[in-house]
Amino acid sequence: MNLEVFTRHYKVKLVSFLMALFLWFYVVTDNTYQYEMTVPIRVTNLAEDRAILSDLPQKATIRVEGTGKALIGLMLSGDAWLTVDLTGVRRVKVFRPRPADVTIMRSGQRIRVLEVVSPDTIRVVLDLLERRSVPVVPEVEVVPAAGYALVGQPSAKPAAVLLSGPRKIVSSLASVKTERREYRELKHSVRETVPLIPVPKTKMEPDRVVVEVVVEKLMEKRLEQVPVRVENPPAGMRGVTIPPTVALVVQGAVSVVSDVRQGDVVAFVDYNKPSKKDPTIYPVQVKTPKGVSVRSVSPDTVRVVLERLR
């Protein structure tokens, strides 16, 4: 078959086809049809001192009737919704949606609502509105790289947000959390804006915070001649260690360890907890400031001599 037969005067044929298609579409869309569609549910006239406590459906299914042109316009614009009017409601009300509760904007003037298919009822439970400042807990896991240390704990700015919603929910919350973040092999500090995890039926202001993680290089510092004290000696007795002092190597972030002095750490032994191998020898324990750990103690054990108090 010769292809030229189909391609000859193709422009005229294409225009004729499009005109025929347009004429068919015009005639068909001028007919009247029924159609089921989904529309959002909107709540209006909620009292200023109230909040919605119950779970409300977000969508409704309605059956409408109109010309094809009007239905297509409505589907494209989405200018329709079901209204739940809470005028005068203080606690509980059960609504039975009717066609009159459906609003269709200008694009749907030639459309008639026949029926609200679903939901057949909407139960609304209200509670007193409560507003309260709630602390923010950063959900952050930090693993510094080798040779680096975390300074303090991850923090949030602002440290608290304003939570508003039903009293039953808001009053039960001690804090709100950020979305989880993980930072591994970290060699530098981090500042990141992180969303808060939403609490159903409430509003947060703001709904995101700046999470700050401070990481610095690890530093070691040697402290000489730190006195060792004896805790829990027998009544009327005082304990003295041999030797009386130890040397410590502490470590932590540069900004923390650089300021640590001998008086900031406490070396001690517990008289009630001697070594299991030799009851005359006591392991040295050390209390350090926050963010400081002990790398080594020399010597790490001492003997205790008791003296009677005068």
Image (cartoon, helix red, strand yellow):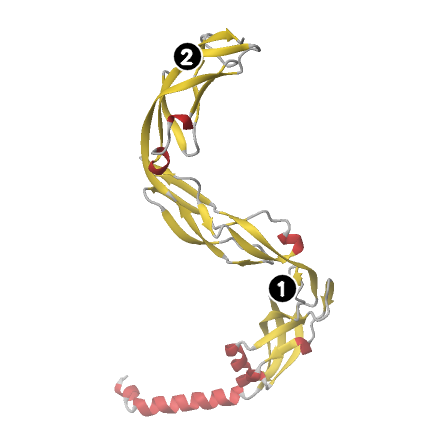
Q: Quadrant of the C terminus?
A: top right
- Measured along the vertical axis of the image, is residue 188 above or below residue 283? below
Is 112 placed left or right of 246 in the picture?
right
- Measured along the vertical axis of the image, is residue 69 above or below residue 139? below
Residue underneath mark 2: 302
Can you give x and y, in whole percent of width and height, for residue 197 in the image?
Answer: 52, 53
Q: Residues within 10 Å of mark 2 (few under 14, many from 20)?
A: many
- Measured along the vertical axis of the image, is residue 118 above or below residue 30? above
Residue at (40, 29) in percent of width and height: 293
Place residue 193 in its image quadrant.
bottom left
Instruction: Give the SS element for disc 1.
Output: loop
Residue at (52, 87) in percent of width and height: 28
Residue placed most toward the observer, 82 or 239: 239
Place residue 85 in its image quadrant.
bottom right
Does residue 275 appear in this view?
no
Mark pair 2, 1: CA separation:
72 Å
Residue underneath mark 1: 57
